[in-house]
Amino acid sequence: MTNKKGRGNPWANFFIIVLIMIFITTFLFLPEQIIRKTAEAERQQMLIWSGKSASDWVGMSSAEFIRDLSEEALKITLFDTNQAFKDWITGRIYASLIWYDVFVYRMFSAVIWFLVIFPLFMAASVDGYYLREIRKSMFISQSPLRLRIGSLFLFLSMIGIIAWLLIPVPIPALTAPLLIILLAFSCWIWTANLQKRI
């Protein structure tokens, strides 16, 4: 009998490998035009949904870090290499910095939406917990299928949030609140259908 103790989750390992490959591929081939368009779209969405003061604050926070990061990153171009390689690596660094700017805007957008939806998230979690507590005193069994569905939705919503944060293409602003609502719904299903004895 094979001893599986100490082994990691194969799906988690597979996901990490795929994520690293996507990062490398994106760094090598991401067109600057697309990432600039994405960054502009994120700024406009932040301005519409959060107002000018919040948008300016996020922009300044991102710009300050990007300035420090770019000074370190552009030192690579000082090495004695041919001009074509210098131009290529400079373009890749520039695209990566804008990509980071998009990530920062989406991260702050996710935080804002999470604060708005937090009462719903807490209500769903508490309701699921007390629903499970009520079922403990009843002669009914918990549903393994619903627990599995809740776990699947929880996994998919978290993957969706990570993908939304990292994908460098324009995405509608309502994607974030919909994914957070799906996360709250997943927590409700998962909590309500946990086994009576853990």
Image (spheres, rainbow, N blue to C red):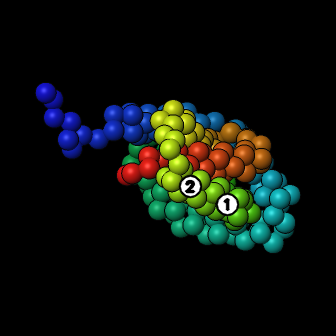
Q: Position of residue 107 (x, y in %)?
A: 63, 58
Nearer to the camera, 146 or 150: 146
Can you tell which quarter of the image residue 50 is in?
bottom right
Numbered mark located on residue 56 in the image: none
Kindly report the distance in space between the C-alpha atoms of the residues bearing marks 2 and 1.
16 Å
Q: Helix or strand or loop: what does disc 2 sit on?
A: helix
Camera sees residue 94:
no
Identity of the residue drawn at 68% across and 39% down? 169
Are discs 2 and 1 less than 8 Å apart at CB?
no
Q: Secondary structure at mark 1?
A: helix
Is the residue 20 above or below the residue 41 in the image?
Answer: above
- In screen coordinates, is 147 left or right of 11? right
Determine which of the numbered discs, if any, sits on residue 134 in the image. 2
Question: Residue 123: which numbered mark, if any?
Answer: 1
Q: Quadrant of residue 91?
A: top right
- Could you tell me which residue is drawn at 21 percent across and 36 percent down? 4
Of residue 183 and residue 80, the one placed in the foreground of this image is 183
The spot of residue 165 in percent (x, y) is 61, 48
- Image quadrant in which the N terminus is located: top left
